[in-house]
């Protein structure tokens, strides 16, 4: 009998290690939620211990050999807390940060992990199936750190905290007067509409042959920048998860975080043809500005973008790969 073995070289994503000096920490993130960080955060950390859960991530749970323990809560807006372990028992506090659970996500591969291994603060550089590059703080790095694989598609759930969120500026308008650009824009829309929404193989030939029905079709086009979807990640190493975005509000609901009233806004921040929309659940403090934001409004925000990868959601990624 001949036994054949197939060797599979499984590699982890590229890792970039940060020093403590390069790591920003979570002071600004806690200040999103309270003006009294030194009092409120220790109180919240103590209170969560009584209702803490252990998130599984991509694995099946903790093992006695783990030297770090990640604790979480069964609330949409919650705290993740990391403890050092010794002989299977918690020894000391390592880190903590506020989180939002997001039900929406995209299929992505992990191109790079930017991490401070002492604090277990990690930012994932992700590439979506349509080629978009996204940076997000890894809520579950402590649990998933040994399980990530290079060139492997994962379904990634996205969420965020908003430093600031407000209605977008509808006065920002660009007028396009170039006749060639206007003609291409009108022809493209007509051709795709007449082709059941699909782009034909001979698109350029059809555009060259296209003629307007009326002179009005070639009138100048105004584009309102306040009605655009956009996402810009940060440009500082290790802080690329600090992002600016603009998009349309698809949903709004009220919740609480440690008795503080909050809003959850479901915002589509990228929406391109032939690509899955990039929808993020954004947590924001209740106030006059957020009270006034309604579903279908366009908003712009400075956010701390987060990612979470769970084993139970990976059927979606496998089906699409």
Image: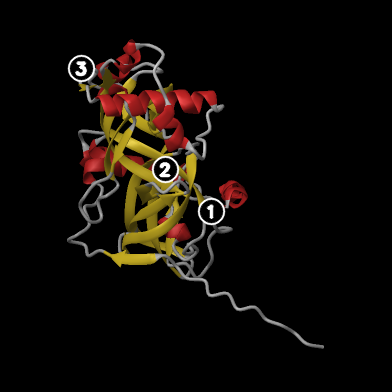
Circle nearer the N terminus (3, 1) = 1
The answer to whether 196 appears left or right of 227 in the picture is right
Circle nearer the N terminus (3, 2) = 2
Residue projecting furthest to the right: 1
Question: Can you tell which mark lies on residue 48?
Answer: 2
Question: Can you tell which mark lies on residue 56?
Answer: 1
Q: Residues within 10 Å of mark 3 (few under 14, many from 20)?
A: few
Q: Identify the element where label 1 is drawn.
A: loop
Image coordinates of residue 205 in percent, x first then y, are 44, 36
> Which one is in front in this view, the residue at disc 3 or the one at disc 2?
3
Q: Identify the element where label 2 is drawn.
A: helix
Image coordinates of residue 255 in percent, x first then y, are 42, 26
Residue occupying the point 50% across, 35% down: 199
Tags 3 and 1 touching, CB below 8 Å: no
Question: Can you tell which mark lies on residue 171?
Answer: 3
Position above or below: 275 against 219: below
Q: Residues within 10 Å of mark 1 (few under 14, many from 20)?
A: some
């Amino acid at each position: 009998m001949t036994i054949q073995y197939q060797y599979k070289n499984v590699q982890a994503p590229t890792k970039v290690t940060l020093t403590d000096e390069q790591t920003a920490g979570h002071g600004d993130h806690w200040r999103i939620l309270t003006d009294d960080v030194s009092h409120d955060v220790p109180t919240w950390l103590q209170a969560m211990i009584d209702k803490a859960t252990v998130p599984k991530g991509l694995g099946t749970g903790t093992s006695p050999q783990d030297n770090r323990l990640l604790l979480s809560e069964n609330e949409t807006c919650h705290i993740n807390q990391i403890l050092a372990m010794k002989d299977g028992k918690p020894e000391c506090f390592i880190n903590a940060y506020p989180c939002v659970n997001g039900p929406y996500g995209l299929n992505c591969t992990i191109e790079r992990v930017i991490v401070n291994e002492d604090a277990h603060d990690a930012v994932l550089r992700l590439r979506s199936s349509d080629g978009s590059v996204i940076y997000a703080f890894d809520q579950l790095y402590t649990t998933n750190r040994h399980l990530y694989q290079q060139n492997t598609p994962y379904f990634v759930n996205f969420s965020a905290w908003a430093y600031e969120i407000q209605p977008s500026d509808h006065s920002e308008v660009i007028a396009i007067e170039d006749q060639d650009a206007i003609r291409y824009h009108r022809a493209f829309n007509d051709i795709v509409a007449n082709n059941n929404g699909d782009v034909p193989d001979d698109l350029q030939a059809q555009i060259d042959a296209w003629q307007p029905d009326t002179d009005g079709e070639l009138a100048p086009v105004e584009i309102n920048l306040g009605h655009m979807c956009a996402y810009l990640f940060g440009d500082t190493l290790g802080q690329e998860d600090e992002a600016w975005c603009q998009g349309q509000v698809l949903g709004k609901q009220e919740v609480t975080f440690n008795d503080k009233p909050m809003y959850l806004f479901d915002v589509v921040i990228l929406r391109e043809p032939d690509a899955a929309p990039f929808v993020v659940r954004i947590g924001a403090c209740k106030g006059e500005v957020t009270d006034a934001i309604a579903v279908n409004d366009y908003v712009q925000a400075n956010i701390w973008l987060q990612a979470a990868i769970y084993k139970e959601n990976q059927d979606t990624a496998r089906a699409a790969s």
